[in-house]
Amino acid sequence: MGSIEGAQPAHGGTRSPVGGEAQPAHMVAPRHAAASHAARPAIAHRPGRGSGAEPHALVAIAAVLAFALVVALGIMVAISFFDHSYADDWHYGVDAHLALEAGRGVFGAVAAAAQEVVDTYFSWQGTYSAIFLMALQPGVFAEELYGLGAVFIIAALVLATAYASSVVVRDLLGAPPAVWVALTCLVLLLQTQLLPSPVEGFWWYNSAIYYTFYHALMLVAAALSARIVRGRTRRGPIGRAGLVGRAMGLTLLAAILAGGNFVTGLVAGTVLFAATVACIARGNRRGFALVPALVVFAAGFALSMAAPGNVERQVSQFPGDNLGVFMTLLRSAFAGIEYIVLWTNGLFVLALALAVPVMVWAARRSACSFALPGVPAVASVLLFMASFAPTFYSMGTVGPGRVQNIRYDLFVVLAFLCIGWFCGWCVRRLERSGRTAAVPWKSLGRVWPAYTALMFAVLALMVGALAIDERHRDDLVSISAASSLISGEAQEYDDQVWARITTLTESPSADIQVPFYTVGPKVLFMGDIRDNMDNYINFRLAQWYGRDSVIGYTPSSSE
């Protein structure tokens, strides 16, 4: 029970492709199977092996990673209560806020948000569902509630990743809970701690809802699609009513995703189209259940891309930056390779070092064939490259940090899928070659706890080294947030924001001057207003508080 070794599935058949059912051995066994079957008793069921028994090392890994994730997320939630609105939060939410101020209630705010969608569609961009969510940012109702937006985004990413991971690990692989917990926590620790722009990933609502939240929705849609085409969950087959309900839920998600950012839209649309075509081509009639979602997505995405506002934005903000189709494809391909290299850093490799033994353990007990590992690898690289196309096509660059955030999230998910598939393929090759018995599984099982302890020790040293070095303290999100909380920087920032709000709400003057902020925690501070009114940031802030003008100035040392 405490070792890494494992037996073959008890059904005695061969492995199915990922997501498929195991086939009877007499139907699909290779020619050499009969000759080698008697010499490979591991194929038979053994108590405690191949039946979900979990080694102590695996349980310990899951427990330690879960504890680390809870601590990291706890710090992120704690600093969220010092978070405040900025810029586009005011721009998209001002009409809904003023509707509430005028006593029109929640329905008035929702109506104003819907009108914002229409106005923006013709003046700026066509991302209809995202604009609606932007217009109802929590600060619309009360600035004190703004930080709940970050908590919501964090929760959405955690729950969506956990759900998608459960479908892959629990449904497809048939692995026990400890494997699911360990791998989910590793993915989430990478996604929450190493994302390129933390403030845009979680704490600036306008950005986080547009990118991170839609990435989370995409994960849910992908997992839901997998359950639909398999026609079952780990608890058993899905009935007709369950299939219809899931298809309707997927269609709703498709409509929402189609009205979000173009990067997530392109990735989600590509995967949905490929899954639908592949299922139908292979004779899986449940693939037709994906068609309504695909049609709705295509219509919604076309509606978003056809918005007159997209042209207006391109002309006003990115004139002459369009690269054209050929250069977009070329630059996207190079950027994909570039960021695969850049993001495969020490912490990422260490996470994989912890994950690989878990993946091998799960693969040995799985009914999946893990055939053709090059196919998912190539498909993942191409999909990752494709994620760069929207920004290269429109602005000629990889785009701002908020776009890079969801590319990093996608990179982590695809990397874990590909590495897991490759581990399974290696296990199957050993089994087919008859060399499984030559692998010292018991010895490896005894080494596993020590190996795991060593990896955690290295991880602790790496995190500690970054934490004590002021130059790199901000490289890890929760370390940066904890530093701001402990030093009082977050509290000072919060105090300065509320002092400004007090001036804006209580001053008798219609023209207000307020000092610039003198502190700004990295995970919270997106920017400040300007020293003039010739910009939308100051204009929307003044409109928000019913002032003619709001101007920032540099405070003296005595202030």
Image: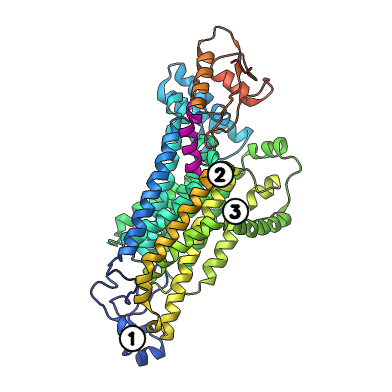
Q: Nearer the viewer, residue 268 or 545?
A: 545
Give residue 16's position: percent from left, percent from top: 39, 74
Mark 3: few/some/many CA within 10 Å (<14, 14-19, 20+): many
Mark 2 or 1 closer to N-term? 1
Q: Position of residue 252 (x, y in %)?
A: 43, 46
User: Which residue in the protein does label 2 denote?
Assistant: 469
Q: Is residue 296 visible?
A: no
SS at circle 1: loop
Rendered residue at 55%/32% (across/down): 525
Q: Residue at x 50, y 10 (%)?
A: 506
Residue kind at label 1, given as amino acid type = Arg
State whether residue 449 is above or below residue 94: below
Provide the residue designation for mark 1. Answer: 40
Which quarter shows the C terminus? Answer: top right
Q: CA distance from mark 3 to mark 1?
A: 46 Å
Q: Quadrant of residue 377?
A: bottom right
Main secondary structure along the magenta-highlighted residues: helix
Element type at marker 3? loop
Q: Where does the image place residue 328, in percent across and percent down from the top left? A: 70, 54
Query: Does the magenta-highlighted stretch encompass residue 93?
Result: no
